[in-house]
Amino acid sequence: MSTSTVVPNDLNAFWMPFTANRQYKKAPRMFVAAKDMHYTTSDGRQVLDGTAGLWCCNAGHARPKIVEAIANQAAELDYAPAFQMGHPKAFELANRIIDIAPTGLDHVLFTNSGSESVETALKVALAYHKVKGEGSRTRLIGRERGYHGVNFGGISVGGIVTNRKMFGTLLTGVDHLPHTHNLAKNAFSKGLPEHGVDLADELERIVTLHDASTIAAVIVEPVAGSTGVLIPPAGYLQRLRDITKKHGILLIFDEVITGYGRLGTPFGADYFGVVPDIMVTAKGLTNGVIPMGAVLVSAEIHDAFMNGPEHVIEFFHGYTYSGNPIASAAGLATLETYREEGLLTRGAELAPKFEAALHSLKGLPHVIDIRNIGLVGAIELEPIAGQPTKRAFSAFLKAFEQGLLIRTTGDIIALSPPLIVSESQIDEIVTKLAGILKTLE
Ligand code: PXG
Ligand code: PLP
C-alpha cells in the first residue's frame, strides 16, 4: 500500500481530542504506519518515537506476538457478553496481571481506558466503605495538577484547571492536596527531588478539617505525567501511605503512565516500595494497541463485597467491553512480550544513560529545569512572556519536522520512549533536542 494514498481529503468532521483543531487542520501531521521505534508519516518520512505514542506503546510498534494474537482472537471469538458470561482469556489475563503486581493486590476489574479505570476505582472505594458499614466516608482527595482522565470523577479529583473549569460543579465533597513542584528548591534534580516530603503532611490538615470518618480515599499519580512529569519528593509517597493507613482512608495509585515498566520496575508501587489499596492502570497493559484498562484491588476490598445471597450481583458496575476477548488477547500477548524481552525492568538498566543524556541539555537557552525517573524525562522551558505554551509547542513542531516525536504540555517537553529504545536512539533524541533548543525563539 502506498502511504501517500491514505490521507483523507476532508478533515472537518473529526473533532480531534486535546488538539488545536483549526491550527492542526491547516497543516496536518499524519502517521500512516509504525514499526518498533519509528512512525512513518503520510509523506513517507521516518519519525523516532520519543513518547511511546501517548505513553502507551511500551514495547514499541507492530510487535508480532500482539498483532498475531489480535488477528487470531478476532477470528476465533470476537465478542462475548461481559455480564453473567465469561471467556477464558479475561480470567487468564487477570491472573497474569496479579502475577506481576505488588503483593497485596489480588483482584482485577477490567475497563477500556485510564479514564474508565479512574471512575471504577473511585466507585469501588465509595462502595467499599458503604458495604463495611462506614457509609459516611464519601469524600475523595486528589491533588493539584493531578491528571486522572477526563470523565466527571476524574476531573473532580484531578487538578488541571483547564480540564475542570468549563464543566460546572463536578463531584461535591472533593478536596485537593498541594502539588509538589518546586523549582526554587528542586530544579535539575536527578531522580527524586530532595525537598518537599512535608507536603504529604497537608493530608493531616485535610483530615483534621473534614474528619477521617468522612474521607473515603486519596488518589495520586506516583509520578504525575500528563501535567509535565512531577516526580515525588523522597519519602513523600511513603508518608501518604502512613497517614492514609492511620486514618482508615484508602490509597489509590493512578498508574496509567507509571504502570508496566515505565519507571524500570513493573509498577510505580514497586519503585517506591509503597503498596496502595487500589491501583489504576491502562495504556501499557495492551501496549496501547487495543483500548483496555485494569483496576487492581486488595483481597480485603474484594472480599468485603462477597456477602449476602449468592445470586445477587455484588457490585453494580461494568462496561459492555470489560475484559473483551480481543483486548484480553492483546493484553496476554503484551505481557508475554514484556516478559520475553525483560521490558518491565529494562528501564532500570537504561535509566543512568537516559539521565546523563537528558541532563547534558542543562545550560541551553530557556531551559529552567530537567528532571528524570526511569524512562521518563522532562525539560521545562521558560515561557515566552505573555504567550505560555508557545515556545514548547514550537519545539514540538520542529522536532516533528526533524523526525522526532516529543510531547509538550504547557512549556514542558516530556519524553517517554518505548522501553525497547537503544542507547544510540537515546543519543539521537537528545542530540536533536539540543539542536532545536538552540534555535527556539
Ligand atoms: N490517569 C492518568 C495518570 C493518565 O496519565 C489517564 C488517567 C486517562 O487515561 P485515558 O486512557 O482515558 O486517556 C491518563 C492518561 C499526555 C497524555 O501527553 C497523558 C494521558 C493521555 C493522553 C496524553 O500527557 N494520560
Ligand atoms: N448508553 C446506552 C444507551 C447504553 O445502552 C449503554 C450500554 O448498554 C451505555 C451507554 C454504556 O456503554 P458501555 O457499556 O460501552 O460503557
Image (cartoon, helix red, strand yellow):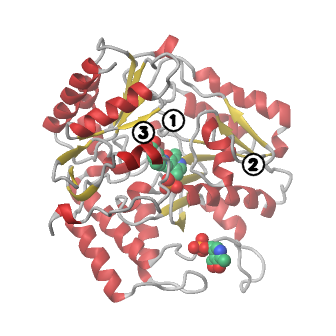
Is ligand 1 within 8 Å of the beta carbon of the residue shown at mark 1?
yes
Q: Which residue is mark 3?
A: 271
* Secondary structure under the numbered disc 1 in the rendered image: loop
Other residues around mark 2 within 10 Å, as few (<14) / some (14–19) / many (≥20)? some
* Residue denoted by label 2: 170
Query: Three-letter amino acid code at disc 1?
Result: Thr
Per the image, label 2 sits on a secondary structure element best described as: loop
Numbered circle sitting on residue 104: none
In percent of the image, x 57 and y 77: which residue is there? 320
User: Is residue 125 shown above or below 251?
Assistant: below
Ligand 1 neighbours mark 3 (CB distance < 8 Å): no
Sequence order check: which comes first, mark 1 or mark 3?
1
Q: Earlier in the sequence, mark 3 or mark 2?
A: 2
Q: Relative to residue 85, is residue 330 drawn left or right?
A: left
- Dot 1 or dot 2, earlier in sequence: 2
On screen, 40 above or below 326? above
**Mark 3 belongs to which amino acid?**
Tyr
Residue under label 1, please give it: 227
Helix, strand or loop under label 3: helix
Mark 3 and mark 2: Cα distance apart in space: 33 Å
User: Which of the two marks, 1 or 3, is nearer to us in this view?
Assistant: 1
x%, y% of residue 370?
Answer: 37, 22
Q: CA distance from mark 1 to mark 3?
A: 20 Å
Q: Residues within 10 Å of mark 3 (few under 14, many from 20)?
A: some
**Tally of numbered tags:** 3
Residue contact between numbered discs 3 and 2, judged by CB atoms under 8 Å = no
Asked if residue 103 shows in the view, the reply is no
Kind of residue at disc 2: Leu
Q: For the N terminus, which image quadrant?
A: bottom left
Q: Residues within 10 Å of mark 1 (few under 14, many from 20)?
A: some
